[in-house]
Image (tube, helix red, strand yellow):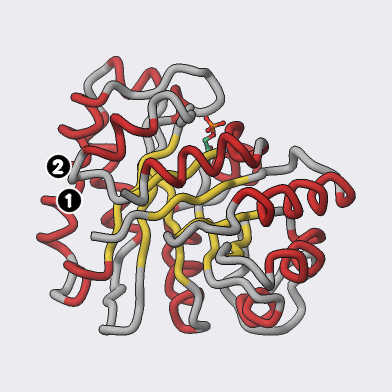
Amino acid sequence: MKKITVGNWKMNLNLTDSLVLAKNYVKEFKDFTGTAVACPTFLALDGVAKVLAASPLKLGAQNMFWQPIGAYTGEVSPADLRDCGCAYVIIGHSERRQWLGETDQMVNQKAKAALAAGLTPIICIGETLQQNEQDERENVLINQLRQALNGLSLNNNQQLMIAYEPIWAIGTGQAITTKDADEIHGFIKAYLRKIMNSAAEINLHLLYGGSVTANNAPELARLSSVDGVLVGGASLNATEFLRIAQAFNK
Ligand code: 13P
């Protein structure tokens, strides 16, 4: 199966630095043949899209609203993201759940709206350290998935990505072990097979996120249960991001 590498730049770069990073991506990725996605801030999308246009890199947004148009101050519609050149959109990142109160119901509405607009949603799920230590991980993930995917089915042309991002592994330098990643990804995939329609078997990809680096990427990439990665910090360096993407494009 084709694997995918997604870079989530979060709110780490100003406009100028976003364009510089996009140009560095283009240089590094000129011979790349796989799927790699850059997700800058909303304001940088248009500029970064123009820089990436002549490269194999794809564009994604970090969030969107579920309504197509109307009186929703401060929000951005899925159609506008498409117009900007986005093919992907991250939905329900744990940072949005923590700081913006994003709920599983909102994630569900956003995922449906993204698919309807022709975007591939990358839905983030993951447990806190406390939930992990109290052995609640599987329940937390099942609850998040059940609600996020409620009433959602895929047709043959639609893709959906789930990103398992344990919150304790984000930005901490402490990635999941390969053994643990394989176990929990196997668990998530078994649950997804149970609740999703059959097109989802081929069109649903399970990514891992949380302290992915060029060092741990090769091991993670070897797992058949890991279909790709969602990379934060390490995506801010074009050379390292390419090394990660190459590990997932073997
Ligand atoms: P880090 O790779 O910096 O841990 O961030 C992961 C993440 O949150 C990607 O969405």
**Taking 232 as reference, is 118 left or right?**
left
For mark 2, what is the residue?
Answer: 186
Task: Say what secondary structure mark 2 lies in.
Answer: helix
Q: Quadrant of residue 50?
A: bottom right
**As drawn, 49 above or below 93:** below
Structural distance between the alpha carbons of marks 2 and 1: 5 Å
Task: Say what secondary structure mark 1 lies in.
Answer: helix
Q: Position of residue 211 (x, y in %)?
A: 48, 27
- Of residues 45 and 3, the one nearer the viewer is 3
- Mark seen at residue 30: none
- Of residues 1 and 77, the one nearer the viewer is 1
The residue at the point 61 percent across, 55 percent down is 38
Dot 2 beta carbon under 8 Å from ligand 1: no
Q: Name the amino acid type tagged 2.
A: Gly
Q: Position of residue 79 (x, y in %)?
A: 63, 82
The residue at the point 75 percent across, 47 percent down is 21
Q: Quadrant of residue 65?
A: bottom right
The residue at the point 27 percent across, 76 percent down is 153
